[in-house]
């Protein structure tokens, strides 16, 4: 009972700390949050590029923070900022910046969601043998599931954030799978966005990257189905024994 009360107090304190952070940001720069949410709502990549560029020598820092914030929030699609980053800083530096910022963002989302909702998920899992099996499976195969999910271009971050936080995947596996998996997906998204926005005369790279994206998505779906079918077969064998 005391432990539950203590956890409740801790959650309230954490919530107040998050609210206080937004209040402090608003007091320091009143225009920052409204402009940010306007950009997020519009999804206007050229406007996002100009907004980041307006910070001058601090542009790379704000690009990192904006990309991080978007991924921690889970929406809108991170491709808005990954594309803006490659337009501003170049293909390779922009992809590296985006991948690192996105990984930090989804890690923050993982910690917050697991802190607030894992206890409720455990109660639901305890009442359902099926969910218990899924939870157990996510613990043993969590790294590969998260890696495949992060590698799929245009898959919403919010989905994988929730899957990770409410499953039994270890923190280390989540972070490593997210970092490694985001390089191909973010690279594909950023290059496609860059070439479309910049209207490249030679579309060879764009076509190649789109084909790679299709192959990656198809391979990920096939492998995921294979993993799930293998898991189902193992469960059936366990039942027979």
Image: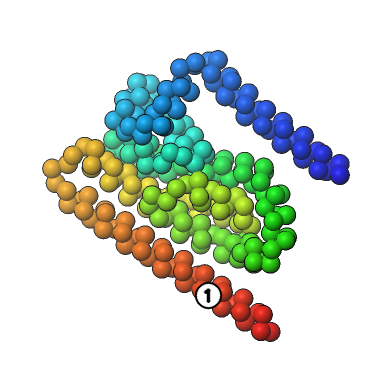
Q: Residue at x 56, y 53 (%)?
A: 163
Q: Residue at x 68, y 67 (%)?
A: 129
Q: In this image, 213 relative to 98: left or right?
A: left
Quadrant showing the N terminus: top right
Q: Residues within 10 Å of mark 1 (few under 14, many from 20)?
A: few
Residue where numbered disc 1 is placed: 230
Q: Residue at x 46, y 22 (%)?
A: 34
Quadrant showing the C terminus: bottom right
Residue 12 spot, x, y in % from top left: 72, 32
- Outermost residue toward the right in this view: 1
Q: In this image, 122 relative to 21: left or right?
A: right
The correct choice, above or below, for 143 with respect to 112 in the image is below
The correct choice, above or below, for 148 with respect to 3 in the image is below
Q: Secondary structure at mark 1?
A: helix
Residue 203 in sight in this render: yes
Q: Residue at x 38, y 49 (%)?
A: 154
């Amino acid at each position: 009972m005391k432990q539950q009360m203590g956890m409740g107090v801790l959650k309230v304190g954490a919530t107040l700390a998050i609210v206080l952070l937004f209040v402090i940001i608003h007091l320091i720069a009143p225009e920052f949050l409204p402009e940010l949410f306007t950009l997020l709502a519009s999804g206007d990549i050229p406007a996002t590029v100009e907004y980041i560029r307006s910070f001058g020598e601090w542009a790379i820092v704000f690009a990192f923070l904006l990309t991080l914030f978007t991924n921690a929030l889970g929406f809108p699609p991170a491709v808005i900022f990954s594309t803006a980053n490659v337009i501003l800083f170049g293909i390779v530096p922009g992809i590296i910046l985006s991948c690192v910022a996105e990984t930090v963002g989804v890690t923050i989302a993982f910690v917050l969601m697991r802190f607030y909702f894992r206890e409720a998920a455990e109660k639901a899992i305890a009442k359902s043998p099926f969910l218990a099996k899924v939870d157990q499976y996510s613990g043993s195969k969590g790294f590969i599931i998260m890696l495949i999910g992060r590698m799929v271009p245009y898959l919403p971050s919010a989905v994988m954030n929730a899957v990770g936080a409410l499953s039994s995947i270890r923190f280390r596996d989540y972070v490593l799978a997210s970092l490694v998996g985001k390089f191909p997906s973010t690279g594909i998204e950023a290059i496609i966005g860059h070439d479309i926005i910049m209207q490249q005369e030679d579309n060879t790279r764009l076509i190649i990257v789109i084909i790679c994206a299709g192959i990656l998505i198809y391979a990920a779906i096939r492998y995921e189905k294979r993993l799930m079918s293998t898991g189902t077969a193992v469960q059936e064998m366990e039942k027979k024994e």
